[in-house]
Image (spheres, helix red, strand yellow):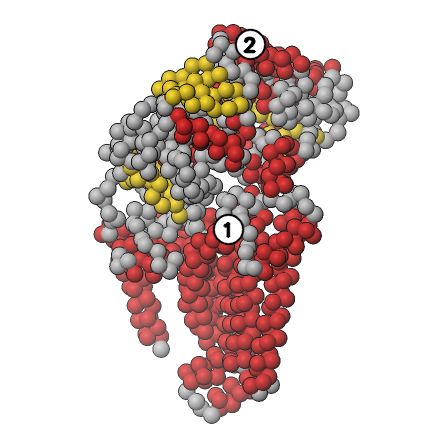
Amino acid sequence: MAKNIVQYVFYRVLQSLLSILGAIVIVFILSRVLPGNPAVAILGPKATPENIERVTREWGLDRNYLEQFAIYFSRLLHGDLGDSYVMGYSVGRLIAERLPASFELVIAAFIISLLIGIPLGILAARRHETKLDLSLTALSVLGFSLPALLLGVLLLLFFGVSLGLPVGGRIDPRYSVKAYTGFMLIDTLLNGNLNAFLDALLRIIPPALTLAIPLAGLLLKLTRNSILEVMMQDFVKTAKMKRLPERVVMYKHVFRNALLPIITIAGLYFAVLVTGDIVVETIFAWPGLGRLIWEAVTLRDYMVIQGSVLVVSIIYIAANAIVDILYLYIDPRIRG
Amino acid sequence: MAPKRVTVIIAVVIAIAIIVAIAISFTKLFVPPQGERILIVGTTYDPKTLDPALSYDIASSIVIQNVYDTLIGYKPGTAELAPKLAERWESNENATVWTFYLRRNVKFHDGSELTADIVKYSIERAKQLQGPPAFLLDVIDRVEVVDRYTVRFVLKYPFSPFPSLAAFTIFSPVPLNATNLEEKPIGTGPFKLDTWKKGEQIVLVANKNYWRGPPKVDKVIIRIYPDPSTLRVALEKGEVDIALGIQPQDIEPLSKNPNIKMVSIEGVVIEWLGMNLRKEPFNNTLFRKAVNYAIDYNYILNVVLRGTAKRLYGPLPPAVFGYDPEVERYGYNYNPELAKKLLAEAGYPEGKGLRELELIISSAERAERKDVAAIIQRNLKEIGVNVRIVDLDWPSFLDRLFNHNFDMYMVDWFPDYVDPDDWIVPLFASYGLNLDGYNNTQVDGLALKARQTADLQVRAALYKQLQKTIVDDAPWIFLYVPKLYAFMQKNVEGFVLYPVYYIDFYPVEKR
């Protein structure tokens, strides 16, 4: 049995590495296929042909794609993501500067969506086919289908203008917060500055809600359906017939089994959120990874595009693998 | 069960109400430190580099202009040159040798003194680094140190706009042996860099030993709001003191906000519609004149742009030296009947025999461009010319522009130095960028002569002739000159806009 688990984890890791390799190749090709030359994009409309040629040569963009890829890949194997054309320094550093902001936002969004989605999903399931269930289900569809652009602007105006709360950015620029972790909510506390912490907390809510509402909608629907499905199964009926208290049946039997699909979706969605927040980071002036990718694409900064998409793919693939491995502990049937 | 649920709902409602109430009162209870005089500036782009030798974008120059000084500056609120690090300057008769006399006792932030050696070093360094703006230094053959405070530029060819070129950020002296200026700039300017959190904010602190005296605020925080709508909200909420980069559609509502102060000035950026003169039908002057008469310019200016721009009648914007007001008389105005007549004379009566023409634009950075293009499309359709608009992202647009893969395009032009030379030579001389394939030997010759002439009156006459010749040839549809705007809180004093993109926080104070 233990051997099986080790084998399973081994194959899963191997599979993940192959997926990452695939991602590297695809991103490399996609960034090269985009129309437009990075040298022109960066030098601007007044670039002289000689300058364009010089820069193209300097960045090795005059070589054929296979050579370019070989150089990129060998540097990658040494843990070097390359240098940004625009900023001049390493892509690894650029990403490291932006990643904590994205992570903080995504984690906040994730927690909010779990707190909203799952309890409401349980409520809907327990009261299924009532008006409450119907309205919750309708709400979840609405939440899931609202585009981030619309939702973001609405929340910006609601929190910022109607409630008059601080919005935009991670913190009021007048606070000087020494960075320890890169997570503003933790750093402000480590600085012992409660005002700054509250300011940061208020500022993270609207963008986190924008990201959380669609996921909450999805989780609500998923939790409800999953619970209803489990409740139809024989072992639940047996438990009920044994006259176990409803609470025990619900949480010990139903919920644990209903959790599987929820974990899958939530785990995958975590990785989606990391990239999916380009719009949210733009609206709320949040200096995260999504915006770095967007800026890199608009300037054809190939190295930054490749590096940051690679990091996101790794997060995605890792989340996927972790979910699969978590299954082993939650669902004994898979171990078999 | 039912009463219990009601209690729960009531409890939740009360809890939410308390949280909201606390949250709202927090903003009033907890106000960030007030002791320092801090100026918060909101903008929409993050700088790419803070090294004046490499910087060639607006966001970077906002910072560089306040951390560094150029050799030559501008008189407040104008594009006229004024002494800065150079107290005065002169040239030989044929404008090939320029001598600059430096101000004494100017210190860098690291304490070292500005001397002629350092100016020579800085220019040679920039030439060697070959960053995006380095082509501006191509005219310089060598830099000579005459004495400790006198530096001489020997040019490769006569170039009378040289002083205006010396107002560009690449002419900012940097101290010897400084490293990593891209992130840690060291200048002679009124502010020093404190921190730069990429994608978030730049903090500048006052240079108390500035040679013109300390600035009027202790700190300037430049905050990046990538979405201009968010910047507007931040301005209206009072989170930023000055907002740079407000979109044209927000200008009118903001100008009516009694809590917000607006300043505006006529700029020197021009917007035009270019045509590919290398191919039919654009190689036909009559056709180009016809389309010039077909556009309802007033509709574009008053309805689409709501008065945020002025008409451009010829190749030069009104605010630049050499502009000939006569162009407003002989330039093209909306005259659809004449347009139809000229189109027929060109061999395309009512547009017969014309293929569908493609107009490429990039509206990502200038949203109003899309609306203007739509009006042009409608106006041209009215005389029988069918146009398809293709909206590309900026790199794709540039790619097609440089490879001459277009029928028509719309774009704008930021001058590097405010001299007619920086419009005429790159945009109309066949030895310039030659985007349109426009080739007129008379224009080529006059442009070269104007560049090499030192006498201002003679130059003005040459540019007068150039404007007439170019407008007669109609290589473009001349569109408009956007105004520049800045919005600020009522207590911000002393902020002055310049026609060029020069942002100066030195005289700004908060009451």
Q: Position of residue A69 (x, y in %)?
A: 65, 53
Which quadrant of the view contains residue B60?
Answer: top left
Q: Position of residue B470 (x, y in %)?
A: 61, 15
Of residues A65 and B199, the one nearer the viewer is A65
User: How far apart in space, not on screen, are marks 2 and 1 (Cα)?
Assistant: 50 Å
Q: Position of residue A168 (x, y in %)?
A: 38, 48
Which quadrant of the view contains residue A186?
Answer: bottom left
The answer as to whether the residues below labels 2 and 1 share one chain is no
Crowding at mark 2 (Cα within 10 Å: few <14, some 14-19, many 20+) = some
Q: Residue furthest bottom?
A: A242
Please give the label number shown on residue B462.
2
Of residues B18 and A3, the one nearer the viewer is A3
Which quadrant of the view contains residue B223?
Answer: top left
Q: Amino acid at mark 2?
A: Leu
Q: Secondary structure at mark 2?
A: helix
Q: Amino acid at mark 1?
A: Ser
Q: Secondary structure at mark 1?
A: loop
Please give the label number shown on residue B390.
none
State which chain disc 1 sits on. Answer: A
Residue at (35%, 41%) from the top-left corner? B193
Residue at (44%, 28%) from the top-left corner? B120
Of residues A276 and B371, the one nearer the viewer is A276
Tell me if label 2 and label 1 are in contact, CB under 8 Å.
Answer: no
Residue that label 1 marks: A90
Q: Is residue B7 left or right of residue A53?
A: left
Q: Is residue B134 above or below residue B312?
A: below
Q: How many marks?
A: 2
Of residues B61 and B90, the one nearer the viewer is B90
Residue at (44%, 81%) from the top-left corner? A251
